[in-house]
């Protein structure tokens, strides 16, 4: 049995992770953390998540929540995750990290901080998206340079980062398969007389609205034909189930940064 603490315990993902972890016979929730001043502090994490009393009060002390935990599941924000990673590294606790929106230097900082602990770090923990990651590489390699690549993502109106971490990873996978540097070829903005499309560029488009859980389409657009690879998330539960699967998988693994491809055996 792996004992977990969950940060962002009152958040959209934190609540589903706590609820689904209580249904797993491989995980036990022993700690729940929210930011200082949060109105749910002191309340039972299970009652807040809607899955019944757990006997775990939500605290703003990560150290306290980690006391009896083997690892932390963190779906918050880059700055919070970086601070939490410092604590986990100090205390020798593993991490499953789902937060997105990291800048390249923050990703590198996270890698350095967590070098001594086992970590699963993935912008999307659903099985479907991770299978898409695998297929995308093959499609891009097989098509080669003759097709224009555009990535469109849609999410709810509360999402704070753009483009989504998933869309960025899709762009990185395609760029790598085509021998391009993602940071150089990603184009996030077209407006006015922006000129003809550079054949190497990867267009990154963001839509925000309502309660869309998450949709990603990668377009490979050629002359007279196009391929569209789309993933639609209908609920947050498969992200949460992925995080739970990652936490159970991580127990006993040596220090290192793993992704969901490793957890799912897709690499
Ligand atoms: N990897 C995936 O599969 C996946 C899936 C969905 C969302 N996400 C990412 O997870 C993150 C959270 O998404 P969400 O929709 O749950 O957001 P949310 O805003 O609903 O939840 C974030 C929670 O973190 C809390 N928080 C802020 N500071 C904190 C601190 N210092 N300590 C503890 N908790 C703190 C907030 O109060 C909030 O409750 C985002 O980066 C999102 O992109 C990843
Ligand atoms: O709701 C979110 O926020 C999501 N974030 C992840 C991302 O940025 O890719 C995964 C999908 C949902």
Image (cartoon, grey):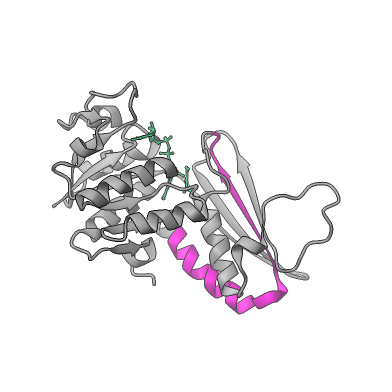
Between 168 and 47, the one nearer to me in the picture: 168
Rendered view: 107 above or below 11: below
- Total tally of numbered discs in the picture: 0
Q: Position of residue 104 (x, y in %)?
A: 51, 56
Q: Residue at x 37, y 45 (%)?
A: 81
Q: Position of residue 64 (x, y in %)?
A: 18, 36
Q: Position of residue 189 (x, y in %)?
A: 71, 49
Between 245 and 123, the one nearer to me in the picture: 123
Q: Is residue 196 left or right of residue 111?
A: right
Between 142 and 106, the one nearer to me in the picture: 106
Q: Picture quarter containing residue 127?
A: bottom left
Q: Picture quarter containing residue 17?
A: top left
Q: Residue at x 21, y 30 (%)?
A: 52
Q: Position of residue 142 (x, y in %)?
A: 60, 78
Outermost residue, right direction?
Answer: 193
Q: Which corner quadrant holds the C terminus?
A: bottom left
Q: Is residue 18 left or right of residue 213?
A: left
Magenta segment boundaries in residue numbering: 129-157
Q: Residue at x 15, y 41 (%)?
A: 67
Q: Is residue 257 left or right of residue 45?
A: right
Rendered view: 192 above or below 151: above
- Whether residue 207 is visible here, answered yes or no, is yes
- Whether residue 121 is visible here, answered yes or no, is no
Magenta stretch, overall SS: helix
- Residue 187 inside the magenta-drawn segment: no
Q: Residue at x 34, y 22 (%)?
A: 37
């Amino acid at each position: 049995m792996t004992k977990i603490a969950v940060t962002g315990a009152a958040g959209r993902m934190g609540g589903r992770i706590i609820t689904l972890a209580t249904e797993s016979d491989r995980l036990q929730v022993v700690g729940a953390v929210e930011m200082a001043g949060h109105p749910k502090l002191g309340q039972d994490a299970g009652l807040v998540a809607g899955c019944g009393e757990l006997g775990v009060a939500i605290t703003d002390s990560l150290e306290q929540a980690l006391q009896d935990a083997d690892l932390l599941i963190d779906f918050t924000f880059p700055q919070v995750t970086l601070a939490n990673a410092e604590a986990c590294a100090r205390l020798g606790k593993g991490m499953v990290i789902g937060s997105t929106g990291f800048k390249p230097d923050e990703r590198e900082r996270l890698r350095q901080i967590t070098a001594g602990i086992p970590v699963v770090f993935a912008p999307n923990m659903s099985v479907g998206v991770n299978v898409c990651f695998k297929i995308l590489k093959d499609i891009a390699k097989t098509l080669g340079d003759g097709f224009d690549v555009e990535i469109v993502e849609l999410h709810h109106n509360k999402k704070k980062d753009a483009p989504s971490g998933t869309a960025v990873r899709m762009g990185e996978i395609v760029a790598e398969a085509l021998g391009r540097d993602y940071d150089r070829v990603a184009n996030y903005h077209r407006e006015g007389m922006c000129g003809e499309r550079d054949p190497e560029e990867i267009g990154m488009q963001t839509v925000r609205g309502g309660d869309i859980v998450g949709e990603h389409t990668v377009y490979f657009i050629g002359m007279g034909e196009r391929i569209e690879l789309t993933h639609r998330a209908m609920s947050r539960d498969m992200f949460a189930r992925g995080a739970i699967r990652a936490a159970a998988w991580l127990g006993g693994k040596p220090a290192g940064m793993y992704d969901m491809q490793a957890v799912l055996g897709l690499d």
